[in-house]
Image (cartoon, rainbow, N blue to C red):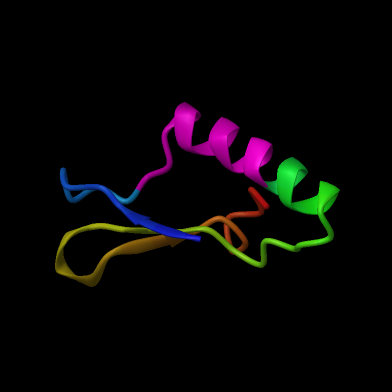
Amino acid sequence: MVHNHPSGDPTPSRADIEMTKEIVRAANAVGLMVHDHLIIGKGGKHTSFKAQRLL
């Protein structure tokens, strides 16, 4: 999964974390796997949920 933060700060919000958990649960229920969730900010900055151990 990938989305951007127009503010430029790729830090995941509480809502980003909770929404990701819900999507992972739903995906698992139908046999799909979410490998990572990336948030893209300004200047090439990004956050990987996998790298941050949020996934």
Residue at position x 62%, y 61% in the image: 50
Q: Position of residue 7 (x, y in %)?
A: 16, 43
Q: Is residue 41 above or below residue 24?
A: below
- Quarter of the view holding residue 26: top right
In the orientation shown, which residue stands out farthest toward the bottom? 44
Using the image, determine if residue 16 lies above or below residue 10: above
- Relative side of 4 to 32, left or right: left
**Does residue 12 lie above or below 1 as drawn?**
above
Instruction: Give 35 or 44, whichever is nearer the viewer.
Output: 35
Residue 39 picture location, percent across and down: 38, 56
Examine the image and state in which quarter residue 46 appears.
bottom left
Number of numbered callouts drawn: 0
In the image, the segment drawn in magenta is 11-23
Q: Nearer the viewer, residue 36 or 9?
A: 36
For residue 14: magenta?
yes
User: What x and y, as percent, mark residue 5?
Assistant: 25, 47
Rendered residue at 32%/51% (across/down): 10
Q: In the visual, does 51 lie left or right of 34?
A: left
Residue most toward the front?
30
User: Could you tell me what secondary structure mostly forms the magenta stretch?
Assistant: helix
User: Residue 33: x, y in percent?
Assistant: 75, 63
From the viewer's side, name the closer residue of 17 and 27: 27
Q: Residue at point 56% right, 55% down?
A: 49
Question: Is residue 46 toward the left or the right of residue 15 in the image?
Answer: left
* Between 11 and 27, the one nearer to me in the picture: 27
Magenta span includes 10? no
Q: Residue at x 59, y 43 (%)?
A: 20
